Amino acid sequence: MKLSGAQLETFRRDGLLILPGLFSADEVAAIRAALAPLFEEDCDANIREKTGAVARTVMGLHQRSELFSRLVRHPRLVEPARQIAGRDLYIQQVKVNVKAAFEGDVWQWHYDFATHHRDDGVPAPQALNLHILLDDVSHYNGPLYFIPGSHRHEPLPTFHDVTSTSYPLWVVDRETVTGLIAEGGITPAIGPPGTVLIFGDLMVHGSPGNMSPWDRAIFSLILNPVANAQTAFARPEYKHHTDFTPVVALPDDCLLAPHAAHV
């Protein structure tokens, strides 16, 4: 799959692409089926909400599941990423972020490069985030909020928030966010299961808590140029993977027809 010229221009202008219907209902069902047993595992890569009751983020999935090992090499993710970020990309992070019904907590306003640079020593904001909505995401069940155009700023000041939620995060302060929203507004990333989101390392985003009775799960793959690989290794492997081998795209039917040629 290739992005059109118009889509690439939208990405350059807004810093975000929302691509409805990129994955079929059957493909999303296969992803969800593979995810279910991983939720039950008791391991450090499964991070719970502050209450301890439900999962917040489930990480390192391609190292724990054969289906996710194929998903991170899916051409509908890898090929657009190559158009934007270059051909030699490694798998930096693989996770599903969850907003459980009634329980899912906020993700504060942040941009990913702050963490990648400060915690992992990634030199430049070249990594790309590729998301797949696994549930019907509406205004009510904790959608991601993006600030269009925020990616065009130099890396913004951040502070390390280690108390608000169960996941430490480098976040952007309220005054800065207010100014960014005055310039670019807020775009909620809503859509049916199978919708894909693509955004870069400087895009400021966050999400509210989920007060609704509907779950919200989003698969996230971060690909980073090999030449821009991490230089610090303080975080565990499941938070930033250390295999810098360039990812190779599989055939387009790799999720539903995983014959030997696909693995």
Image: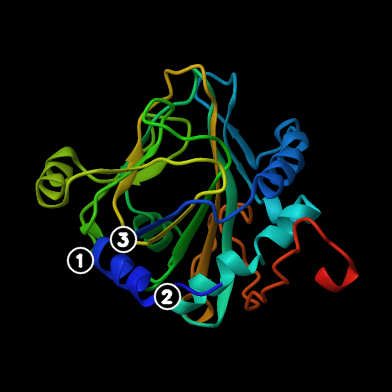
Q: Position of residue 112 (x, y in %)?
A: 38, 55
Residue occupying image coordinates x 51% and y 16%: 213
* Amino acid residing under circle 1: Glu
Vertical placement of 239 versus 241: above or below? above
Depth check: 229 or 97 in front?
A: 97
Residue occupying image coordinates x 49% and y 24%: 50
Q: Residue 84 shows which numbered tag?
A: 2
Q: Is residue 248 left or right of residue 105?
A: right
| Total numbered badges shown on the rendered structure | 3
Q: Which residue is mark 1?
A: 154
Q: Secondary structure at mark 2?
A: helix
Q: Secondary structure at mark 1?
A: loop
Q: Residues within 10 Å of mark 1 (few under 14, many from 20)?
A: few
Q: Is residue 129 left or right of residue 149?
A: right
Q: Residues within 10 Å of mark 3 (few under 14, many from 20)?
A: many
Q: In which quarter of the view is residue 161 placed?
A: top left
Cα distance, mark 1 to mark 2?
19 Å
Q: Is residue 91 visible?
A: no
Vertical placement of 263 versus 174: above or below? below
Q: Which residue is mark 3?
A: 202
* Amino acid residing under circle 3: Leu
- Quadrant in which the C terminus is drawn: bottom right
Q: In which quarter of the view is residue 128 placed?
A: bottom left
Q: In which quarter of the view is residue 62 placed?
A: bottom right
Q: Residue 187 shows which numbered tag?
A: none
Cα distance, mark 3 to mark 2?
14 Å
- Sooner in the amino-acid sequence: mark 1 or mark 2: 2
Q: Secondary structure at mark 3?
A: loop
* Amino acid residing under circle 2: Ile
